[in-house]
Image (cartoon, rainbow, N blue to C red):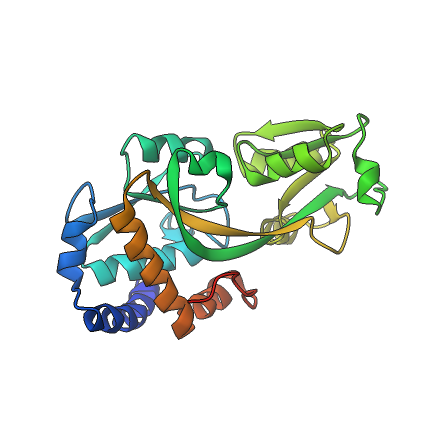
Amino acid sequence: MSKKYGIKSLALGAVIALSLSACGSSSDDAAADLGLSDSDKLVVGMTLQFKPQMYRDDAGEPDGYDVALLNALADDLGVELEIEDLDFTGLIPGLQAGQFDMVSVGLSNTPERAESIDFTREYVPYAQILVAGADSKPSSNLMDWNSGDFKISALQGSTAAKLIAEEFPKATLVEMPDQSGAFLEVATGRANAIVVESYLFDQFNASNPDQLKRVDVDPLTLQYGSWAVQKGNTALADYLNEWLCTAQESGQLAELYEVEQGGIMPALPQTC
């Protein structure tokens, strides 16, 4: 664990520990009763490609908002955090197969996904936006993009891909196995636009200025990401819900979001 996250984790862990002790629970009891594959570890599936939410730093170590939360969670449970870094499309199958205890990648709780995995309460908000090539002259009328003349890219299996199919059914959906590939499709002119989270566009734009531009000021939709656990593991889901609720009420979610994401955290839809 890095020193940066160790400091944050202890602060958040103290808040959570006080809350759980008031309910008659302890960290040791919680770790033993949550159905973890290894009682000494919390194994989490992630895709470390989404800076600043989750990524690898210059030394190759996991970093970002989700990683900060997970370090705090592992500290509170008294276990070692082990991150399994997979392609996005492998996360849900890996969770179903018991490859890890939970997934932390900002998954939206959709009916289709809820058939095979269980979700916690929301812990991260993000806006989906439409972005086009910088040399194009895109219409600011979003309905003009619902045309067979356009190709719109997205991360394969993401809610962005689903949103394209719903909002622009006449356009050609181009799904890419990684986020960088989805951006590259537009930057190289193989696709006309991409639907993507606004914070990911901001990161791409900072490293690749003047290659892409936002089509409209307003987001297509505001969505919220949750943690995911194996279907039927209500003990872990309930614990994580209480943990997130305590972190939300204490202000720690917003604090970590501001530090890691570099902006004010929009309000989450659920109150505790």
Tally the numbered discs.
0
Instruction: Determine whether, in the image, residue 62 is placed left or right of residue 196.
Output: left
* Residue 113 rendering spot, x and y as whole percentages: 46, 36
Viewer-nearest residue: 34 or 55: 34
Whether 120 is drawn above or below 244: the answer is above
- Pick the quarter of the image with the C terminus: bottom left
Q: Residue at x 33, y 32 (%)?
A: 96
Whether 122 is drawn above or below 3: the answer is above
Instruction: Determine whether, in the image, residue 104 is placed left or right of residue 37.
Output: right
Viewer-nearest residue: 156 or 208: 156
Camera sees residue 187: no
* Residue 247 rendering spot, x and y as whole percentages: 37, 67
Q: Residue at x 58, y 49 (%)?
A: 200
Instruction: Determine whether, in the image, residue 26 is placed left or right of residue 152.
Output: left
Camera sees residue 155: yes
Q: Which residue is drawn at 36% across and 59% down?
A: 69
- Pick the quarter of the image with the N terminus: bottom left
Q: Which residue is drawn at 21% across and 49% down?
A: 34
Whether 74 is drawn above or below 102: the answer is below
Instruction: Determine whether, in the image, residue 192 is placed left or right of residue 245.
Output: right
Whether 232 is drawn above or below 54: the answer is above
* Residue 47 rendering spot, x and y as whole percentages: 43, 41
* Residue 183 rendering spot, x and y as whole percentages: 63, 38
